[in-house]
Image: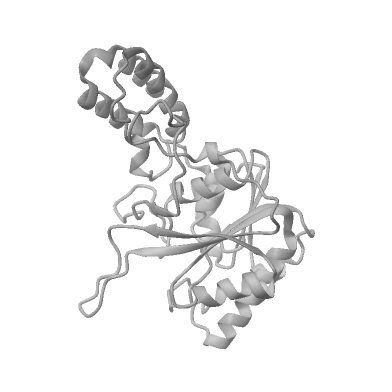
């Protein structure tokens, strides 16, 4: 396994107490939502008061180990998110930054009431001085305008990524596996290469896989030994690209009519937006051909060969 990545089996409260104070650059984690999911233990079946106490305990430890310039992203379901928000802001004195909604097209089906189609992510920082690498997470502009920043736009706080479907090769035997591109955005935005990222509820190991492929150091904690073994195998698997992408990354701006500007932009687009997504390069180049015809295709085929080879 990569020497920069560490996965430990055990209770996150016990293990985090061994981590030095203010030593972690970023915390990204998907804790149990207390909805009685089967994680191979009773961690998702607590009484309400017990769950809130548990949340306060692990968040306190997480806040302690986070650097003054650090950021914390916490996934949470609607039932308890207001409690988690209150704990992070009022009890721990963390600084609220963003309430992110991850939207998806498939999920739990209901016959009475509306089917849920999103999860939420709370972004808090330790102080007002924190890392945010906007250029690393921009999305392509919809239109070319000389006044636009063609490096791309802020992706906003509503994110659309597909679920990791059971038919996908990367699907792990875990009930709440999250897509890699979701973690890619958070990790690229709020850490630099060589930084230390902590995930106290490592689950299927998505956070560590993204750390591994983006040159971060990662510490994962997972209480279920079967999942720990699964994560070890996942980290040893060959990398062919992350398992999901924001579909906007594959679009080319409209009105990009100047041939020379367009050629330069196509080259930049692949480096800017598709670095960890080689399977998306061909779809992007087909979008170029569809929108601007075959005049640009000599450049496109050259870039496609570079991406494949």
What residue is at 56 percent from the left and 60 percent from the top?
29
Say whether residue 210 is left or right of residue 193: left
Say whether residue 215 is left or right of residue 108: right
**How is the model colour-coded?**
one colour
The foreground one among 185 and 7 is 185
* Quarter of the picture holding the N terminus: top right
Query: Where residue 308 sits: x, y (%)?
Result: 38, 23
> Is residue 267 something one can see in this rendering?
yes
The foreground one among 259 and 241 is 259
The foreground one among 252 and 51 is 252
Vertically, is 36 above or below 94? below
What residue is at 63 percent from the left and 42 percent from the top?
216
Splitting the image into 4 quarters, where does residue 134 fall? top right
The foreground one among 236 and 303 is 303
Query: Where residue 279 sits: x, y (%)?
Result: 35, 34
Query: Where residue 27 sits: x, y (%)?
Result: 62, 57
Say whether residue 132 is left or right of residue 151: right
Query: Number of numbered discs present?
Result: 0
What residue is at 63 percent from the left and 70 percent from the top?
88
> Is residue 309 something one can see in this rendering?
no
Vertically, is 121 above or below 26? below
Vertically, is 85 above or below 220? below
The residue lying furthest to the front in this view is: 147
Splitting the image into 4 quarters, where does residue 269 fall? top left
Query: Where residue 223 sits: x, y (%)?
Result: 58, 68
* Quarter of the picture holding the C terminus: top left
């Amino acid at each position: 396994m990569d020497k920069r990545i560490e996965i430990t089996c055990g209770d996150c409260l016990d293990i985090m107490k061994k981590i030095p104070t203010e030593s972690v650059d970023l915390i990204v984690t998907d804790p149990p939502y207390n909805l009685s999911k089967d994680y191979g233990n009773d961690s998702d079946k607590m009484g309400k008061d017990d769950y809130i106490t548990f949340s306060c305990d692990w968040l306190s430890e997480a806040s302690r180990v986070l650097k003054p310039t650090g950021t914390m992203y916490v996934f949470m379901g609607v039932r308890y998110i207001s409690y988690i928000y209150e704990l992070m802001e009022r009890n721990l004195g963390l600084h609220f930054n963003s309430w992110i909604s991850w939207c998806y097209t498939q999920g739990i089906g209901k016959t009475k009431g509306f089917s849920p189609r999103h999860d939420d992510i709370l972004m808090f920082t330790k102080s007002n001085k924190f890392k945010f690498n906007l250029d690393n997470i921009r999305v392509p502009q919809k239109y070319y305008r000389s006044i636009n920043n063609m490096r791309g736009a802020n992706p906003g706080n509503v994110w659309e990524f597909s679920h990791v479907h059971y038919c996908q090769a990367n699907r792990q035997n875990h009930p709440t596996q999250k897509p890699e591109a979701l973690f890619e955005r958070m990790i690229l935005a709020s850490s630099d290469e060589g930084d230390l990222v902590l995930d106290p509820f490592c689950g299927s190991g998505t956070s560590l896989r993204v750390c591994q492929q983006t040159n971060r150091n990662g510490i994962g904690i997972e209480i279920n030994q079967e999942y720990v073994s699964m994560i070890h195998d996942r980290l040893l698997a060959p990398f062919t690209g992350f398992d999901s992408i924001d579909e906007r990354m594959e679009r080319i701006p409209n009105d990009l009519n100047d041939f020379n500007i367009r050629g330069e932009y196509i080259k930049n687009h692949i480096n800017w937006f598709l670095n960890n997504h080689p399977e998306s390069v061909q779809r992007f180049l087909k979008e170029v051909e569809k929108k601007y015809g075959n005049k640009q295709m000599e450049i496109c085929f050259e870039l496609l060969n570079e991406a494949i080879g």
